[in-house]
Amino acid sequence: MKKVLLFLLTSCLLFFASCSKEKQFDEKLRVAYQEMSNSLTSSTIHCAYTTLTWKTAIYENKTPSGRYCSNFNEALDELSDGYKKSGILDSLYFSMKRMQNATSKLSNPPSSRKECFDDFVEIVSDVSSLYRMAIDISGSCATYEDKTFEAEESISKKIELFKIKYAEILKIKEE
């Protein structure tokens, strides 16, 4: 009788510990998801504004401040200098760091959340790649625009699938 009681007590404790670990993971995931969303938004805006600046320099010979430029490098340099002076690059960097820190807190997920963790890490990796594109402008205007658009589109699809698969964990309510 004592062995049965001990077994039941141990089983209950393991069950509750498992549930607690899942709840902790879920809460950390919601924080990491929000940080990932913030970083994605910042990187996307940065890439879009870079493309717009580039096109404006090519087609209208104007820098972001509206002054005449003879080539797009002047406009991109002015944009970069403006981002540095205003702290936008720092903000973008710290947004990325917050995402990475929040994601690192998800390591060692409960076995019931392993697939969720793997899917999320894949998205974070893609957002990190987009961030690198945002700060390291390369190629031609057309290839830069295509690369960033394709990356944003791919990330968007992965996020939608993630939200569908893990709506309960993320506590997403249908509208």
Image (cartoon, helix red, strand yellow):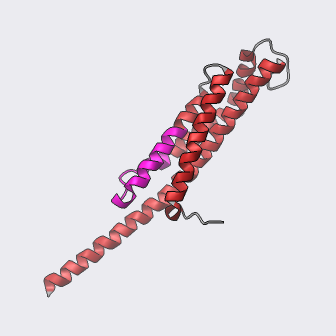
Image coordinates for residue 115, horizontal then vertical, percent:
40, 53
- When the figure is inspected, residue 106 is found, relative to residue 48, above or below; the finding is below
Residue pictured at 64% horizontal, 33% vertical: 89
Residue pictured at 71% horizontal, 24% vertical: 81
- When the figure is inspected, residue 114 is found, relative to residue 44, above or below; the finding is below
- When the figure is inspected, residue 85 is found, relative to residue 22, above or below; the finding is above
**Quarter where residue 172 is shown:** bottom right
Residue 121 counted in the magenta span: yes
- When the figure is inspected, residue 15 is found, relative to residue 62, above or below; the finding is below
Image coordinates for residue 5, horizontal then vertical, percent:
20, 84
Residue pictured at 57% horizontal, 35% vertical: 130
Q: Using the image as rendered, state which of residue 163 and residue 31 is in the foreground.
A: 163
Residue range of the region highlighted in magenta in the rendering: 100-127
Image coordinates for residue 163, horizontal then vertical, percent:
54, 56
Residue 10 counted in the magenta span: no
Residue pictured at 42% horizontal, 52% vertical: 117
Quadrant the N terminus occupies: bottom left
**Quarter where residue 48 is shown:** top right
Q: Using the image as rendered, state which of residue 100 and residue 120 is in the foreground.
A: 120
Please indicate, yes or no, whether residue 152 appears anywhere in the rendered image. Answer: yes
